[in-house]
Amino acid sequence: MASGLCSSPLLKAVSSVSQDDENPCRFLATVAREWTTQHSVLGGFLQALMLSAAKKFVVAELGDGRFPDPIHAFVQFLSMVPPGPVAITCKILRRSSRKCVVSVELVRIRASPAPKPDPPATVGVFTYGDLSRERGLSQPSDPALTPPVPLRDTDCVPIDDPVVDATPVTRKLHWVAPRSANGLWGHRLGGHHREVWLAFRDGSMIDDVLHLALLSDMPLQPAATHQPGFYSRYALSTLCLSIEFKQRPDPATRWVMIRSNSHMVSNGRYDVHLQILAENGDLLALSNHVLNIWDLRRGPAAAKI
């Protein structure tokens, strides 16, 4: 992680997790409303919060500096999480000289205790290592589609649609994207291929892998940008996601580009593959998602998560 742990509102929020005095495997935090979408806490923020708790747990159990970076994360979202207090429980599943695997469960803390404990709302399996010390086979990739990264100043325009300011998490960001011939934001490559530049409006640097965990789950994904007024009729709910961290962002990183592709939107469920790129085109992270779309007129039960 970056040395200045509280250099941004995100890092300040996720680093606020505190170890339970009565249970060293349990961490407590309170999620503010500023990290919500139109209906619940953003999955990317929950992922970053759980990664922060797991890192503190690994340090407490195994010592600082041994496994400084998340290498891979898988998160399954079982139920929506409203803003408020949560508890995060961690357990080491396996460790070797190079890797440490941790299971993580996040549970809502209700104001009025229920007759029995709530089941986990979000679960994760995280692999930690040291990105700076990774060694092994490396091969160049030559994909069939190799479009140049669109220049932010000349090839793109700001997304000024009201939907950007409609939720707390989306209005934290500048959104800049190519505009395709048919008027769809960021669909320069056609179909469900989409590109967007992101930066924090408050000037925060994207200097930590936890920023990548948050940005991997930002809304305005391909399915939502194919029809006007989408967010007045539908909501998106992430079923599960995984992210592989390729390298730490440079400490001076302000902008990243997210290149996304959805292979099939069908019957209220779809996939998204993401690449998070630095300004020079270097690959920072890869992410895969499965999402549900539900009709706001029918309510969230329509998602059948």
Image (cartoon, grey):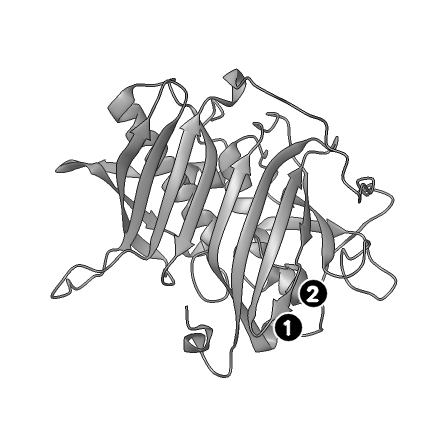
Residue closest to the far bottom: 297
Inter-mark Cα distance, 2 to 1: 7 Å
| Amino acid carrying mark 2 in the image | Thr
Of the image marks 2 and 1, the number of the one nearer the N terminus: 2
- Secondary structure at badge 1 equals helix
Q: How many marks?
A: 2
Q: Quadrant location of residue 100? A: top left
Query: In the image shown, does 286 or 253 lie closer to the viewer?
Result: 286
- Neighbour class for label 1 at 10 Å: few (<14), some, many (≥20)? some
Q: Is residue 203 above or below residue 236?
A: above
Which residue does the numbered mark 1 point to in the structure image?
Answer: 230
- In percent of width and height, residue 244 lies at 53, 37
Horizontal arrangement in the rendering, residue 282 relative to residue 20 (left or right): right
Horizontal arrangement in the rendering, residue 156 relative to residue 192 (left or right): right
Horizontal arrangement in the rendering, residue 38 relative to residue 261 (left or right): left
- Secondary structure at badge 2 equals helix
- In percent of width and height, residue 220 lies at 63, 59
Which numbered circle lies on residue 225? 2
Horizontal arrangement in the rendering, residue 19 relative to residue 249 (left or right): left
| Amino acid carrying mark 1 in the image | Phe
Q: Residue at x 62, y 25 (%)?
A: 250
- Neighbour class for label 2 at 10 Å: few (<14), some, many (≥20)? some
Q: Residue at x 38, y 36 (%)?
A: 52
